[in-house]
Amino acid sequence: MSRNILLNRRAVLTGLAGLAAQPALANVPVSPIPTPRPAAPPPRDLAALTRALIADVGLSGEVACVMADAQTGQPLVVIQPDLLLPPASVTKAVTAAYAYDTLGPGYRFATRVLGTGPMRDGVLHGDLVLAGGGDPGLDTVGLAQLAADLKAIGLHEVKGRLLIWSAALPQIPEIAPDQPDHLGYNPSVSGLNLNYNRVHFEWRQQGADYEVTMDARVGTLRPRTGHARVHLAARSLPVYTHRTDADSGHEHWSVARPALGTGGARWLPVRDSGLYAGDVFRTLLRSEGLDLPAAERITILPMGQTLASRISAPLYDIARGMLKYSTNLTAEVLGLEASAHLNGAPLPDLPSSGAAMTHWAATHLGMTQSRFVDHSGLGDESRATANDLCTALLAQGREGALKTSLKDIALRQDNGTNTPLTLSAKTGTLNFVSALAGHIAPRTGPRMVFAILTADMARRSAIAPEDRENPAGSRSWTRRSRRMQYNLVRLWSGVPLV
């Protein structure tokens, strides 16, 4: 055997031994021509996918939406961006920004009790004045504490009158006059508010008759009120009617007896919150040993010493609660207070204050097309565009006071787990109107700001006055709209739809 053959045989055997020592390499194919990697999938056409989703839902009326990169401001989806539609309670997000900028997140409201004369040996030689500062969160517990504080300083007799001052803000009988009289979310507004300006009406059947009560309950406190009164009427419709006595200011509710059943309760709005608060305060003072005549309203705050006071939570906390629970009274108070601060004095009504906020929003937020008739979105004539709302969210920033105040909304998947994204937003709902606007933080990818407005104005305008509380078809329409909005959020975040 030649030397060359021996060398080649030894090389082959050595190579085989090496392969045996590395079995993982034995099955790796070897090709002299490289195989190209698969091409990356093309980016999703979010605008086309959005249009397809909206078309698939087939919601009656109009749909407008804008979604943009929260970092760069670049619009990623734009559909009917300049269509003016009612923003409903999404208005409250603009109101919060207005109040933060004008009053400051640390702003607080003060409710005071003044004495207009000297106090000697527990006797006040003058009038006792309940002076409202507009606090939207004042409740029966707060009034009871003021009454207890007066007792704690030794006050046991008042020679003068019990007065109320509510002129820190204008006296507004109801937020939206086109709403039914009995809806608790459409109360009065003034500089002296109590229990969100609602009275608790309860009825229980007693044989062939009913026991009815009207009180200002909070927790275990249930002071009766004589300001709001109720009687039962032998009629079928309307279920509720309301009138105010021109001489006394008392509010009289008439309720259709056949509609009551065996018993129940509901909150009814108060149309004069100042007199209501004064009446309840008088009852609470009586429980502390101070018996005073009925409260009288004054329009000019007299000089006097502060005998007791209640300071509200900071505005930041108040606004967060407003955005979470969508309280209309709170929104109107914050907007009216901000407008009064800018104007140097309270404006006379909600449309005037809404116009002031409209101007501020155009100047500070770039909302050049929108207009507001109030601060809660309850008014039917407010209008906004998706582009304006998205621009406002961009102007407020990703970590500003408004962003951190918005409610986190958990979207559930079919298996009950949370969708892998964070949605911080404000919802808005009126009959045949539904809106959603806020921030989206997907698990991966850029953060987004967005606004979605939907409305069927033809169906809304066709609602008969007696059907405004719950018109046929409105609830199912709203459910479909809201589901579509949340599915748009999922689509934009790159998560499966449900």
Image (spheres, rainbow, N blue to C red):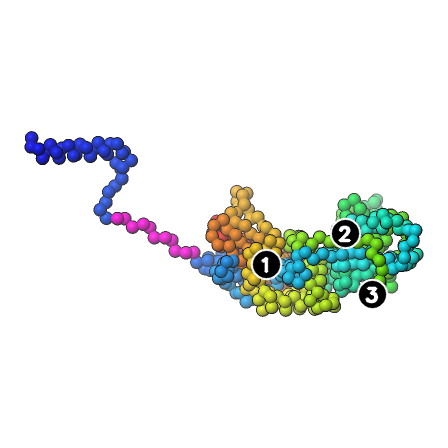
CA separation in Å, label 2 and label 3: 24 Å
Task: Check disc 2 and report the residue beneath it.
Answer: 139
Q: Is residue 43 magenta?
A: yes
Magenta segment range? 34-44
Indicate the quadrant where residue 9 lies.
top left
Identify the mark nearer the N-term, 2 or 1: 2
Residue 106 percent location from the top left of the image = 68, 56
> Hey, what amino acid is under mark 3?
Ile
Task: Check disc 1 and report the residue beneath it.
Answer: 435
- Main secondary structure along the magenta-highlighted residues: loop
Q: Which one is closest to the eye, mark 2 or mark 3?
A: 3
Q: Is residue 32 magenta?
A: no
Q: Is residue 77 visible?
A: no
The residue nearer to you, when weighing 61 against 378, is 378
Residue at image point 52% right, 49% down:
421
- Compared to residue 368, the image places residue 131 above or below, namely above
Indicate the quadrant where residue 335 lies.
bottom right
Residue at image point 74% right, 67% down:
345
Crowd tier of the residue under label 3, counting other residues whose Cα lies within 10 Å: few below 14, some 14–19, many 20 or above? few
Task: Check disc 3 and report the residue beneath it.
Answer: 300
Residue 39 percent location from the top left of the image = 34, 53
Q: Secondary structure at mark 3?
A: loop
Q: Secondary structure at mark 1?
A: strand
Indicate the quadrant where residue 243 lies.
bottom right
Identify the mark nearer the N-term, 3 or 1: 3
Residue 157 percent location from the top left of the image = 91, 52
Q: Secondary structure at mark 2?
A: loop
> Hey, what amino acid is under mark 2?
Asp
Q: Is residue 340 visible?
A: yes
